[in-house]
Each structure stands twice: as C-alpha cells, then as structure tokens.
Image (spheres, grey):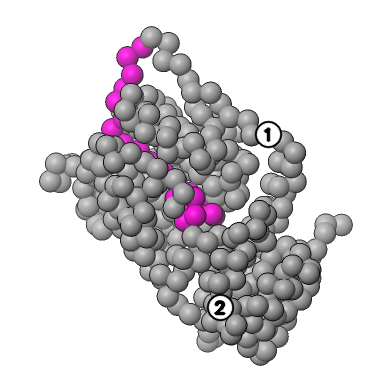
Amino acid sequence: MSRSTCILIADDSRVYRRIVESVLNDIEDVEVLAVAGDGQEALEKIAATSPDLVLLDMDMPRKDGIEVLQALSRDESPVPVAVLSGVADAGLTIEALRLGALEYIHKPEGAGARARLMGSLERVIRTVQALSRNRSRTAGQETTAYAPHASCGKTRDPVELVLIGVSTGGPRALMTMLPDLSPEIDCPIVVVQHMSTGFTHSLADALGRACPLPVKEAAHADPLEPGRILLAPGGTHVELGRNRIGGGLPLYLVDGPYVNSCRPSVDHLWKSVAEVYERGVLAVIMTGMGTDGLDGVTALAAKGAYCIAQDEASSVIWGMPGAVVQAKLADEVLPLSAIAGRINALVQHGI
C-alpha cells in the first residue's frame, strides 16, 4: 500500500480550513497532518511535523504567505508549497511562484466550487507525489550529463531561433536561467510556460526586469525579432506563421483544444516551427510534469534541430525533459545552472 501524502493547511479562516480538510479527506492516500492559523504558526508546525505539502493562504496575520515562502526558500530542502488563496493578484502569483510555490490555486467560489477545489488539489498532490519519486530516484546519485556533440569538422548552422518549453517549477527556473543569457544574442527566443490566462503578462514583466534581453508577452501577429524574448500568453496556443510581417515571421495566437492537457502547449508551437524552419533551431526543454514537448522535439529533430534537456537533479519534475531524454532526442542534458551559458555558446558558434 502506498504511503499517504501528509498535508499541512495554513489559513487564518477556521471555516475554510474545515472546507479544505473535508475535501482532502475524500482524496485517496492523503492525510491532514496539521493546521495553522497564521504564517508564524505554519513555519513552527512545518519544522515540527515535516509535511509532504503545505497548502498556504496568502493573507494571514503575523507572517503572510510571501513571508512564509521567503523563509522556506532559505532551507536546503524546502517543503513543497501550493498557494491556496482568495487573493487574485497576478503580481503576487508570480512572486509566489518565483519563490518556489508549485502552484497558485485561487479559492473557487459559487456552484461547483467543491468539485473544482478537489480537482485542483488532486492535481497538485499528483505533482508532489511525482516530486517525491523523483527525489527518491536521484538521492545519492551524481548528475549525468551528455557532453556537447562534436561538430566532426562539418560547417555549423547558425542559430536562427531559440525555443524554450517549461511547466512545473518554470517561473523560478526561468528567473534563474534567463538573466544569464548574453545581451549579444541576435536571434529571437520564444518561451512556452504552462500557465493560466491572466498571469503571463506579470511573468513577462518580472522576467524583463531581470533579463538583459527585452521580454514581452506575445500579442497576435507579433513578429519574431532578433534579441527579443516572446512569452506565450496563458490560456491560448501560439503557432508560427509562414509569411513575414515587418521583417520577421509572425507568432499567431490561436484557439483550439488543449494539447497534453495544456494551453499553451509546447508541442503545438514546436510542431508549427518544424513546418517552417529547415535548420537553425535550438530547442530547450525544461522542468515540467507530463510529456508536452516530446512530439515537438521529434518533429524538430527530423529537421536537424539541436535539443538541450534540463537534467533530473535540477528539475522540480523531470517529466517533460525526461521524456525527451528517454526518447534519445536530447543532444545535451545539463543542469539548470549551465543552460544559459550553453545557449550563449551555441548562438555564438552555431549548432
């Protein structure tokens, strides 16, 4: 029998703590380990009980949710946290994710609220269980990385486009990696981060303040421009057009069904790129649950694209990059700390 996932609920509303506890009691293999009514009590009980997951409200006395996340981020092995808040603030959401929160769940209201809450909690619990399995596999193991492929004397293709796909743990990974990119990068970069509608604008702003390159949430028909990073908007797919607009190929926002339970989807964009580019694409697949990006890498690899996958040890969840590595489609497997430097080198010298 599998071990229960032990959860601490931190919320200053006694009524809502009882609602969450009731929902968790209906989820298999879950145990409510403790509850806390404010941020300071939450930190004390986390230290005393070592839960597998903390469900954290943002607006609490003594210490608010951000202060709790700041304190936890200083630990060597911080406990996984999912924010469960009634505060719908995009900037606050991005800050919480930057500090390491796995997910930001807005407290559902109205008809069907309990079912929607259960769905959100089940999703984050599955993420934590996958994270636990990941840590168990990698405990005591050294990171294994593929060495850069030798050019074997052939002429290198210049990098014409950099693609980045990322999901769970992505905002923090992007805030770590993108600031180390060279300001001399002279090709477009397009990022697909799995995120809901309304949050990617704030993420783009935060990344733009930290990154030496301009970062923009993509608008419909935005052209790909050298040295600019476009971030796919939450809740919509993006795909590459074939006809240039203002000197660059356009990125179109398109409706459509979820792909791999995701919208925006890495696969949706990357497969459209494979239809347009014959060579010169550098694809970077980073931390995230599931396999979104695998089909896209497969299509790009057939056109000669070069792929970097984040390694297991530095990923929050090694689902997306792991699927690419296991399919033997990664040219290199690197820790998060080495990815920006390798992008800089490949853009400078070719692939």
The residue tagged 2 is 64
Q: Residue at x 49, y 60 (%)?
A: 98
Distance of label 1 from label 2 (alpha carbons) = 37 Å
How crowded pointer 2 is (Cα within 10 Å; few <14, some 14-19, many 20+) is rated as some
Q: How far across and how far down the image is residue 150, in percent?
A: 46, 16
Does residue 197 appear in this view? no
What numbered label is drawn on residue 302? none
Side of 251 where 59 appears, left or right:
right
How crowded pointer 1 is (Cα within 10 Å; few <14, some 14-19, many 20+) is rated as few
Question: Looking at the image, which residue sits at the far bottom?
Answer: 15
The one nearer the camera, 211 or 278, is 211
Mark 2 belongs to which amino acid? Asp
Which quadrant holds the C terminus? top left
Mark 1 belongs to which amino acid? Glu
**SS class of the residue under badge 2?**
loop
Q: Quadrant of residue 343?
A: top left
> Which is more N-terminal, label 2 or label 1?
2
Which quadrant holds the N terminus? bottom right
Side of 58 where 52 appears, left or right:
right
Q: How far across and how far down the image is residue 181, in percent?
A: 36, 41
Q: Quadrant of residue 72?
A: bottom right
Q: Residue at x 54, y 32 (%)?
A: 333
The residue tagged 1 is 142
Q: Residue at x 71, y 53 (%)?
A: 132
Asked if the magenta segment contains residue 165, the reply would be: yes
State if disc 2 and disc 1 touch (CB < 8 Å). no
Q: Range of the magenta residues?
A: 154-174
Q: How far across and how far down the image is residue 44, in percent?
A: 72, 73
Q: Residue at x 61, y 33 (%)?
A: 326
Q: How far across and how far down the image is residue 169, in percent?
A: 54, 54
